[in-house]
Amino acid sequence: MRSSPYQVVMLGAVGVRREQLQAIVAGRVTDLGLSPGAVNFIDEKQARSRDIRAPTMAIFFGGRANAIDTTLVAELIDDSVKIALLASSLTQVQAEIPPQLQHVNVLEVGEDGAGLERVATLVLETFRLLRRERRLFISYRRVDAQPFANRLYDALDARGFDVFIDVRSVPPAEDFQSELWHRLCDSDVVVLIDTPGFRDSRWTREELAKANATNVQILHLLWPGQQEDSASSFSHFFKLTWRDFMGFWPRRGGWVRRSTLARICDEAEKLRARAMAARNRYLVDNFCDAARDLGAEPAVQPESWISLSVPGTVRSLVVVPAVGVPTSDRINEIFDDMAGATLNNSDIWIIYDNRGVLESWLTHLDWLDKHLPLRTIRMAQAPDFLRRAFK
């Protein structure tokens, strides 16, 4: 991993949206515990003098397609720089995007900046500061809010989130509760719909407790008339009012306004960086405490991985926290990232929070460990692995 600042090249009809995007990205980067200047925004005139060693992406703001420096675009493409395309509408791609980029999927962003929250998270995902899996979990009481939950699912899904909702996401013949806990613990944010009957349900209370215990961020939607309560002290509250529904407020909220759904989606985007920071901090703090208990001196690097010398040997450990349930793709990504940052005598460990993870998935990860040049370590087992490594 490199310590150079991340670079974003701004192309096209940028206008005031540059300052808007910079402010949003700075906020999300701060949530991650990094310097607000960790992501450096540069314009077209500076693009050719950029630091070629630093991770770089480009953002093209759609405008008159014939006004773009197509030579610069070609150079960025040749350098394998990812270019995110923004258009005012999907129907305006041919008018606003140069022909050489029209094969790339676009995001809709309005002149007023609507949609920039999604662009900000795309920046962080591209630089691997946020994981690419955009997982959310909707917690609700069916009898109170099924139509509202369905509308919310559709809106989040349209934003590119991988959304778990019980009536659509659990396969037939599977252990319902185990699948539910697995997906909740692998989510960045729980969107909790707190209707008048929500707190009376055993299962919804358990979902809230599980999210609090595993540092999953909670976007707590308070139904009109519902009040904040002490059991939800870790929640980020979003108060719904009668104005958030069209016409006469219908029971169960099926006629929620599109503007309200858009605001909820934006709040979910904002919380993802806080979720990553909180869950990453849990893993780093607990592992370092376990290492110090054995007399070791772990060093946390700026990119949040941990270096650790094995006493009495020339070996060292490189320990990488992984938020959520590790997948083979994510393991491969971590290995590629760390290959240039480790010494020849270093072992690579990936630590993860195993609470709530399906037993079949844990068994799968144990099997992978026998075939990979690194290993995954359940946080609960980290002290035992450290003791064996230090023998």
Image (cartoon, rainbow, N blue to C red):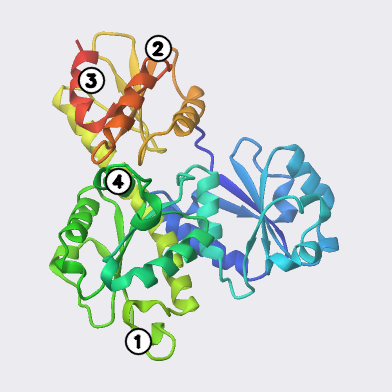
Q: Earlier in the sequence, mark 4 or mark 2?
A: 4
Q: Quadrant of the C terminus?
A: top left
Residue type, mark 2 in image:
Asn
Q: Nearer the viewer, residue 267 or 369?
A: 369
Camera-near label (1 vs 3) is 1
235 versus 391 height, above or below: below
The answer, for residue 279, to whether it is visible in the render is yes
Camera-near label (1 vs 2) is 1
Q: Which residue is mark 2?
A: 345
Q: Which residue is mark 4?
A: 185
Q: CA distance from mark 1 to mark 3?
A: 55 Å
Q: Which residue is mark 3?
A: 385
Q: Nearer the viewer, residue 70 or 209?
A: 209
12 versus 369 height, above or below: below
Q: Residue at x 74, y 43 (%)?
A: 76
Q: Earlier in the sequence, mark 2 or mark 3?
A: 2
Q: Nearer the viewer, residue 332 or 312?
A: 332
Camera-near label (4 vs 2) is 4
Left-right relation of 112 to 70: left
Labels 3 & 4 near each other (Cβ < 8 A): no
Q: Earlier in the sequence, mark 3 or mark 4?
A: 4
The percent position of residue 139, horizontal first and vertical second, equals 30, 60
Camera-near label (3 vs 4) is 4
Labels 1 & 2 near each other (Cβ < 8 A): no
Quarter of the figure with residue 149? bottom left
